Image (cartoon, rainbow, N blue to C red):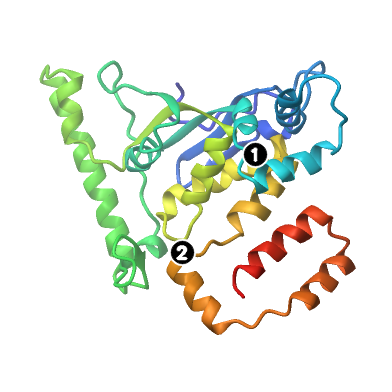
Amino acid sequence: MNNSNIPNQEKSHPAFEVYKVLDKGFIRLVDCMPSPCDPNSISADDAIAQMARVSYGGGTDKKRDNSGLINYLMENRHTSPFEGVVLKFHIKMPIFVERQMSRHRTSSQNQLSARYSVLPNDFYIPNPDRCQGQDVDMKQGSCGHLSNNEKISKSINEESNTSYKKYEELLEMGLSRELARTVLSVNIYTEAYWMMNLHNLLHFINLRVSPHAQYEIREYAEKMRETVKRIAPITLNSWEKHVQKSISFSKEDMSIIKECSNVDIELIKNKTEELGWSKRKTDKILSKLNSLS
């Protein structure tokens, strides 16, 4: 693995663009099933529809185009067909970001080993603007401006260099790589190949682009979303519409809404007709609204 430089884009399709992330990191798609570069292969969106239609067998009319079918699958949480598309990424990231990514156990990954290799002197140094105080509302987050942020960023850089010098000294003294690495901090960069099916990847993106996620992992998740947009644009659009930008209510939420709402069912019906909604889609929203009356 090349730990110092951002690799060149290896394939012509835009999905394989190499994205620079943070100060020294990157993320790139290295493989995908189905492959957008194979002229004999169907697209990822078509593969999802194809996998869904096998449920109906032969002799069944094709009632929806692929876009309509994908919307139906996403809206009704029929997830299996989305698992038939698989993406594999090559990622260079700070170890603390990798630890967060490895919490998503539906991924398959293999990481650069500091037992086999000597790690390069590549540390993530947050720029001064990123050096913020502790968020008092979101206990795990950061926010606000610190007047000494430049000093803090410089201090992180100095401590990182100090730990790396100690790492080199221990190696020169003959200590094994697996023990010498213990003096290194979690802002040192590592690399990994990281693979996940599309259904689980969209779930990962949903969690990791959230404002509640740490800024550094959000940066990687946003690049993954951009890659998915280029691999399966219909699916991503449907996911944004039916999952990411939708909301749900608890039973307690519903009881409060029911007490406070006054829904005009006829007005809603007229509006859905004006928008050209299908009967199925109209019936579904009316069923939801009727539960509030």
Residue type at the position of mark 2: Ser
Q: Quadrant of residue 282?
A: bottom right
Label 1 environment density (alpha carbons within 10 Å; few <14, some 14–19, many ≥20): many
Give the residue drawn at x 24%, y 49%.
158
Using the image as rendered, state which of residue 213 and residue 249 is in the foreground: 249
**Residue 168 spot, x, y in % from top left:** 20, 28
Q: Is residue 29 left or right of residue 213?
A: right
Q: Quadrant of residue 184?
A: top left
* Helix, strand or loop for disc 1: helix
Residue at mark 2: 250
Give the residue drawn at x 68%, y 79%.
263
Using the image as rendered, state which of residue 31 and residue 123 is in the foreground: 31
* Helix, strand or loop for disc 2: loop
State the quadrant of the C terminus: bottom right
Give the residue drawn at x 77%, y 73%.
268
Residue type at the position of mark 1: Val
State the quadrant of the N terminus: top left
Q: Is residue 267 left or right of residue 2?
A: right
Label 2 environment density (alpha carbons within 10 Å; few <14, some 14–19, many ≥20): few
Mark nearer the viewer, 1 or 2: 2
- Image height of 230 relative to 37, above or below: below
**Residue 266 spot, x, y in % from top left:** 79, 76
**Residue 8 spot, x, y in % from top left:** 61, 28
Using the image as rendered, state which of residue 137 and residue 4 is in the foreground: 137
Residue at mark 1: 228
Q: Is residue 174 left or right of residue 212?
A: left
For the residues labelled 1 and 2, the Cα–Cα distance comes to 31 Å
The numbered disc on residue 205 is: none
Using the image as rendered, state which of residue 127 and residue 185 is in the foreground: 185
Give the residue drawn at x 23%, y 41%.
185
